[in-house]
Image (cartoon, helix red, strand yellow):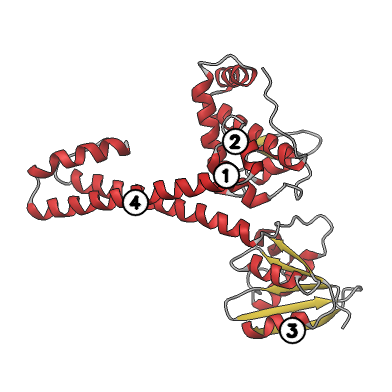
Amino acid sequence: MNIVFLGIDLAKNLFALHGVDASGHACLVRPSVRRDQLLEMVAKLPPCTIGMEACSGAHHWARQFVRFGHVAKLMAPKFVAPYRMGGRRGKNDAADAAAICEALQRPKMRFVPVKSELAQSRLAVHTLRQSWIVARTAAINRLRGLLSEFGIVLPLKAATVRANAAQHLEALPDWMKTVCLDLLQELRHLDERVNEYDAHVRAIARADERARRLMEVPGIGATTASALLASIGYGHDFKNGRQLAAWLGLVPGQHSSGGKHRLGHITKAGDSYLRSLFILGGRAVMAAAANKRDRLSRWATSLAERRGYWIAVVAIASKNARMAWAMLAKDEAFKPVG
């Protein structure tokens, strides 16, 4: 079999394969391949380009296939869906594999960078840290909601909830007091876990020279720098900084036609975690800009006065993403402009 392109629909136990030769003729169609058979089957194939949707386990399989001389490429599922011939009604594993194979051959297809084991393990630290933060926020909201049933309404600020909740315990019924004490104890435990993983993130950032350089940019801290490096590496999968900003969803969507250029709202596409980190960094820059007179602070303050606070925050986030790409792709240090 002279397979040139191979599409694989990934799953937990049963996989579907669709391979074509140079003329586009299907020469390998396997709608059901067991998990323990997949690696052996791919290893026997001549070197070819293998396409998969970026999903759970995709980076692991890509690394395995590269070992056998293949070229592995990952695509976002939303870019594959238009090539499924049966549409939504004709969706099955074999149709998905054929659509992946077809999308793989498109010259302008955008691919997801294959992550190394080190990058994935570092992102796992961020994932678990974020889950602790979500759990802590849920515990605080649960405590506020339960206390409000007894006429005790606490502010939204987490530190105030921690400080004031204990002051109202004596006025509560016994069982309610037990519940609140357990929630406060859970909050202390979650605070410890978040602090522990914050230390892990700082250690990851300090150990990488590229992350230390990124942290010199105003609005980029250890969390943003380490998460960005684990996600994009040197940024060579993006042609320029605007592509990275677009991938993060920090640019306006286009609705242009007939020679008229119309820009809409910020797309909010791509990696929501990285986008939120850059937005938080933009807010930090805006908070400090009022007391500074450097070029970036003057620009941010002027933009906020003309267009509004949130537009300025997103603009700073987009600018930081572009500068981060330039520093990584060109291996340059941050050069502040006074």
Which badge, 1 or 3, comes first in the chain's sequence?
3
Mark 2, other Cα within 10 Å: few <14 / some 14–19 / many ≥20: many
Pointer 4 or 3: first along the chain: 3
On residue 41, the disc is: 3
Distance between mark 4 and mark 3 Cα atoms: 46 Å
The residue shown at (49%, 49%) is 200
Residue behind mark 1: 205
Disc 2 versus disc 4: distance between alpha carbons? 27 Å
Return the residue at label 4: 190
The residue to which callout 2 is attached is: 215
Q: Which residue is at a point 66% across and 60% down the rendered structure image?
A: 116
The mark that comes first in sequence, 1 or 2, is 1
- Is 69 in front, or is 318? 69
| Dot 3: element | helix
Residue visible at 64% across and 68% down? 60
Is the residue 328 above or below the residue 70 in the image? above
